Amino acid sequence: MPSLYTEIEINAPKTAVWQALIRKQDWLKWNTFLYDRDATKAFVQGKTVFLSLRRLAEEAETEFEPMVTLLQPETCLVWVYSAPGFRSEHVFELQDVGRQRTKYIHRETFSGTVSRLFLVFLRQDEQQGLRRMARELKRHVEDARPGW
């Protein structure tokens, strides 16, 4: 299955990184890749959330409504978006890598009959978006250091 992957080490404890990640209503303050479209819908396993993404700064936003399939506090958030012939799974994983340090991992896996067609057009831009979000999360959490 085609996939995209990025990781970054953040100088903060997992609790701080997790709080920034799941507070999607605050994403507009720091995140230029993913956007919350309905702040009333928290991340709840088995429920959908209404989001949009912008792969490139000049691109129009793409709205989607994925299902949260796994929610392990301070460890893992997984959602799946499906459309006819296309499935995308986003995995956000946090790992302790030392005192007050967290490895943030974001991967996206694609499947379905039309996924290979989409990836020809989206792969590089989507990868840039994942990397941009990782850098922005790092900056946001590290800048908020006194709040831990």
Image: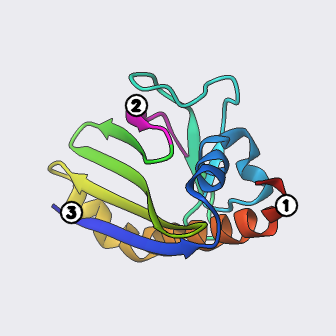
Q: Amino acid at mark 2?
A: Met
Above or below, comparing residue 135 to residue 147 in the picture: below
Residue at 54% across / 31% down in the picture? 43
Which numbered disc flags the more N-terminal residue, 2 or 3?
Answer: 2
- Disc 1 to disc 2, how far (Cα)? 34 Å
Q: Position of residue 36 (x, y in %)?
A: 66, 41
Which numbered circle lies on residue 27?
Answer: none
- What's the mark number on residue 146? 1
Residue nearest the viewer, comparing 60 with 39 = 39
Of circles 1 and 2, which is in front? 1
Name the residue tied to disc 3: 116
Q: Secondary structure at mark 2?
A: strand
Q: Mark 1 or mark 2: name the one nearer the start of the chain.
A: 2
Where disc 1 sits, the SS reads helix
Mark 3–mark 1 Cα distance, whole angstroms, equals 45 Å
| Residue 40 rendering spot, x and y as whole percentages | 69, 23
Tell me: 89 left or right of 135.
Answer: left
Badge 2 is on which residue? 67
